[in-house]
Image (tube, rainbow, N blue to C red):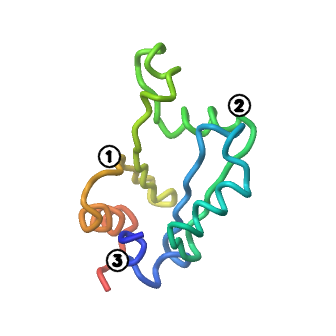
C-alpha cells in the first residue's frame, strides 16, 4: 500500500496494479476482495483470479517461472515477484516484492516514464 500511496493520483490513471492469484481454487473473487479491503487497497489495484490454465499462461508470458520444473511446480517455492511493464514503450522489469516501497515506487516511475509528484 505504501507504493500505491507514494505514486498518488497516478495510480488508476497512468499506473494500474494487478495482483494475480496462483491458487484460483482458494482465491475466489470474494476472498480476494476481502483481502484487498483488509489491506486498505485503493482504486487502481485489481486482484485477479481465473482458470488455472489462463493464469499459468499469463505467468509464463510474464516470465514468472523457475527454470527447474520441480521447483516451479511447488507453489510453496513461489516468492513474491513484481513485474512492471510499460507495454506501449516495450519496457519491462521484474524485482522482488520485498524491496523497500520507496525503491519499488522509483522503479515503477522509471519504467512508466512518469515524474515524481
Pick whichever of labels 2 and 1 is earlier in the sequence: 2
Q: Position of residue 95 (x, y in %)?
A: 32, 47
For image coordinates 64% across by 56% down, the residue present is: 32
Looking at the image, residue 43 lies above or below residue 24? below
For image coordinates 45% across by 53% down, the residue present is: 90
For image coordinates 64% across by 62% down, the residue present is: 34
Pick whichever of labels 1 and 3 is earlier in the sequence: 3
Pick whichever of labels 2 and 3 is earlier in the sequence: 3
Label 1 residue SS? strand
Report whether 31 appears left or right of 20: right
**Residue matched to label 2:** 53
**Residue matched to label 3:** 6
Callout 2 touching callout 1 (CB < 8 Å): no
**CA–CA distance between discs 2 and 1?**
24 Å
Which quadrant of the figure contains the C terminus?
bottom left
Q: Position of residue 52 (x, y in %)?
A: 70, 33
Looking at the image, residue 50 lies above or below residue 35? above
Looking at the image, residue 95 lies above or below residue 2? above
**Residue matched to label 1:** 96
For image coordinates 72% across by 37% down, the residue present is: 25
- Residue in the foreground of this view, choosing between 79 and 69: 79
Report whether 53 appears left or right of 106: right
Amino acid at each position: 500500500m505504501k507504493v500505491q500511496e507514494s505514486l498518488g493520483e497516478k495510480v488508476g490513471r497512468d499506473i494500474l496494479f494487478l495482483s494475480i492469484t496462483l491458487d484460483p481454487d482458494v482465491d475466489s473473487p470474494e476472498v480476494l476482495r476481502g483481502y484487498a479491503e483488509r489491506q486498505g487497497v485503493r482504486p487502481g489495484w485489481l486482484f485477479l483470479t481465473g482458470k488455472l490454465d489462463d493464469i499459468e499462461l499469463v505467468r509464463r508470458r510474464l516470465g514468472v517461472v523457475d527454470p527447474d520444473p520441480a521447483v516451479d511446480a511447488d507453489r510453496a517455492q513461489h516468492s513474491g515477484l513484481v513485474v512492471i511493464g510499460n507495454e506501449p514503450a516495450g519496457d519491462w522489469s521484474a524485482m522482488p516484492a520485498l524491496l523497500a516501497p520507496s525503491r519499488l515506487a522509483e522503479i515503477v516511475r522509471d519504467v512508466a516514464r512518469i515524474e515524481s509528484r
